[in-house]
Structure formats: structure tokens, C-alpha cells
């Protein structure tokens, strides 16, 4: 990966570069927003963006900072 391709906060799971046509199928987990999947092909690179959603389940604790003063 070139230095210009690195983006903060982006996680690359798979990177491939092959010439010609291809077909690849993906099976997404249940916590994916299927209505908001985006795919862009630029300079021969296909980028697929998938948004996760929170599933109902046990509530997590949340830490809140308290300012005293």
C-alpha cells in the first residue's frame, strides 16, 4: 500500500489487485446495515464500505467524566 492510500481510522480487511473481470460474493453478519452499503471503483480499486448497526442485547456500562470545581 502506498503512503498516499493510508487513511486514519480506516481498517483494510483485504486488498487485491488483478486485471480483468471477476466475481466475488460476501456473506455479511447480522449487524450490517444492508441498506447503506456503498461501492466505488476508482483507478482500478474497488472500495466497499459497510456500516455496522447495534443489535439489541445486554446494555453496556458507560463511564461519564465528572468535573468537580
Image (spheres, rainbow, N blue to C red):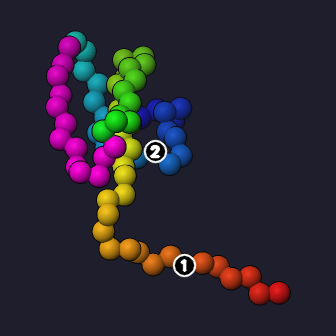
Q: Name which residue lies at 36% across and 40% down.
A: 50
Magenta segment: 21-33
Q: Which structural element holds mark 2?
A: loop
Badge nearest the viewer, 2 or 1: 1
- Look at the image and say whether residue 27 sits in the magenta stretch: yes
Residue 38 found in image quarter: top left
Q: Name which residue lies at 19% across and 36% down.
A: 26
Residue 58 found in image quarter: bottom left
On the picture, is 56 further left or further right than 61? left
State the image coordinates of residue 17 (x, y, percent, origin top left): 29, 25
Dominant SS type (magenta): loop
**Few, some or many residues within 10 Å of mark 1 (<14, 14–19, 20+):** few
Depicted 24 relative to depicted 13: above or below? above
To which residue does mark 2 refer? 10
On the picture, is 31 further left or further right than 38? left
To which residue does mark 1 refer? 63
**Few, some or many residues within 10 Å of mark 2 (<14, 14–19, 20+):** few
Q: Determine the CA span between mark 2 and mark 1.
A: 26 Å
Q: Name which residue lies at 28% across and 30% down.
A: 16
State the image coordinates of residue 30 (x, y, percent, origin top left): 23, 51
Residue 36 found in image quarter: top left
State the image coordinates of residue 40 (x, y, percent, origin top left): 40, 23
Q: Which structural element holds mark 1?
A: loop
- Look at the image and say whether residue 67 sits in the magenta stretch: no
Q: Name which residue lies at 54% across and 78% down.
A: 63
Amino acid at each position: 500500500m502506498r503512503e498516499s492510500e493510508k487513511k486514519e481510522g480506516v481498517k483494510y480487511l483485504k486488498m487485491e489487485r488483478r486485471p480483468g473481470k471477476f466475481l466475488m460474493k460476501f456473506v455479511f453478519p447480522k449487524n450490517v446495515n444492508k441498506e447503506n452499503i456503498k461501492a466505488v471503483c476508482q483507478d482500478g480499486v474497488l472500495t466497499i464500505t459497510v456500516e455496522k448497526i447495534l443489535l439489541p442485547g445486554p446494555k453496556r456500562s458507560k463511564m461519564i467524566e465528572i468535573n468537580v470545581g
